[in-house]
Amino acid sequence: MEMSRILDPAGKKPVLEMLRTAKGFALDALGRYEEALKAFESARKLSGNGKISCSGKGIVFSHRGEWKKALETFDTALIFDPKDATASVMKAFALIRLQDFEKAAEVLERSTVEKTDPDLPSCLLGFAFSKQGGFEKALRAYRKATEANPKNIHARNGLAEIYFRLGNSMGALKELEASIAEAPENAFSRSLKGRVELEEQACEDALESFRRALALDTEDQRLLLWDAYARYMCAEASFEENSARFRYMLLAAAGKLEKAAICQEPEDNELKAYALYFLGLFYCKIRYFRKASERLEECLKLENSRKVKQPASLLLKSIRVRNRRYAWWEWWLAPGTYGFIKKAGFGLIFLLIFSLLLSHPAASTLPIVSWPAAIVSQIFYQPGENNVLWALYEKEYVSSILILSALLFLPAFGFGRPEQEELELETLTPPPPDFDIPVSILEEFTEKLEKSLFSPEPMRESIEKLGKF
């Protein structure tokens, strides 16, 4: 009699649904997502109310990065139970991944009103508000999350980032130290701490923070840019530009950038443009102008690097102006301070040299200059006087011509340069690593779903049935 009750299809359905849902979670944990989706779908068909299996499918889609499908399945779960807070929070997380922060905030505000454990929902709410620029609301949400769970490093990192943006460096450092104490292997905490320390001009501490961040996350090329930038700032603050230590630090930073994949792989043009810009800046500072020009020209050829193009082109222009070889006449004729006086001086010296040369007796015998030579002789000398004067003072005439010529050509030897408009150079800072709520927080939602699936009372009943079965 008991066996017939156990084998009754109506009695087996809930057990089979639970088993297939559990199978779906197990397959998802193993990364076998297609099989997990089939298991969840099979469980949903066994029950009219398949909210747990729908949420399970949503988690699988999330692990696969298919956020639109995940959003649809979480919406389906909420149709079965509109008050399901876990499904609401997961829906908000999917909306955040789809960059719909406003709608995510609306969902979270509705779902967290009656929650007794606002840790993760409040953290996500703070993230959504901060992405919209609502820093005051974001601060309140993050603080609520840290009060509910002081070990929530994502909320502490979110607080630290907002404090840093608002200029509260001490508040940011306090949150980051707590975050690092809880999770020493979080690269974002280390990198943000380095940025705050750079702002406070604690260059050595910043270098150490970026070094540790790089050791923890070798794939994030932005950390490499920040490490190189920190070395540059440290060298600027600690050493004279002409010192060996200054050159050594910048050469070390440039060497790391040159060897890195960031300068070799063209997948991310923006990061590559930043790297080439900093290489140009470093080489310029240590007076390797040819290398600096090469890197900056390469930077300007890249597409999708608008933020970098203007400062890179200004720096390249500055290098070219500084190292240009000027013609002797440019100094005399270039506009600028005392431009009129220099032009008048140029004309006077040139006229004197020309007049002295034309006054030579031999000039009147040359076919091209005989006519102007005759005019000069008529204006400045009595008939035959120039022949006598040149015979008596030939050395003096030649010396005068040489002195005037030397004065005219003096700028060609670098004793004078045309005045150039001083260029205002802007030193860029690298793009900051993105603060993000990682997909790993879904594991906590998965645990909650598994607990609701295997809650103590239904679990005891299921075990009894399974044992008899």
Image: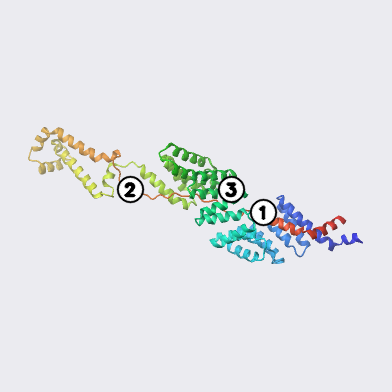
Mark 1 — residue?
A: 63
**Label 1 CA crowd tier, 10 Å (few <14, some 14–19, many 20+):** some
Image quarter (top left, top right, bottom left or bottom right) of the C terminus: bottom right
Q: Name the amino acid, label 1.
A: His
The mark that comes first in sequence, 2 or 3, is 3
Q: Horizontal placement of 247 versus 380: left or right?
A: right
Residue 403, which numbered label?
none
Q: Name the amino acid, label 3.
A: Ala
Mark 2–mark 3 contact, CB under 8 Å?
A: no
The mark that comes first in sequence, 3 or 1, is 1
Residue 420, which numbered label?
2
SS at circle 2: loop
Mark 3 — residue?
A: 187
Is 284 placed above or below 7 here? Answer: above
Q: Name the amino acid, label 2.
A: Gln
Q: Position of residue 145 (x, y in %)?
A: 62, 58
Q: CA distance from mark 1 to mark 2?
A: 59 Å
The mark that comes first in sequence, 1 or 2, is 1
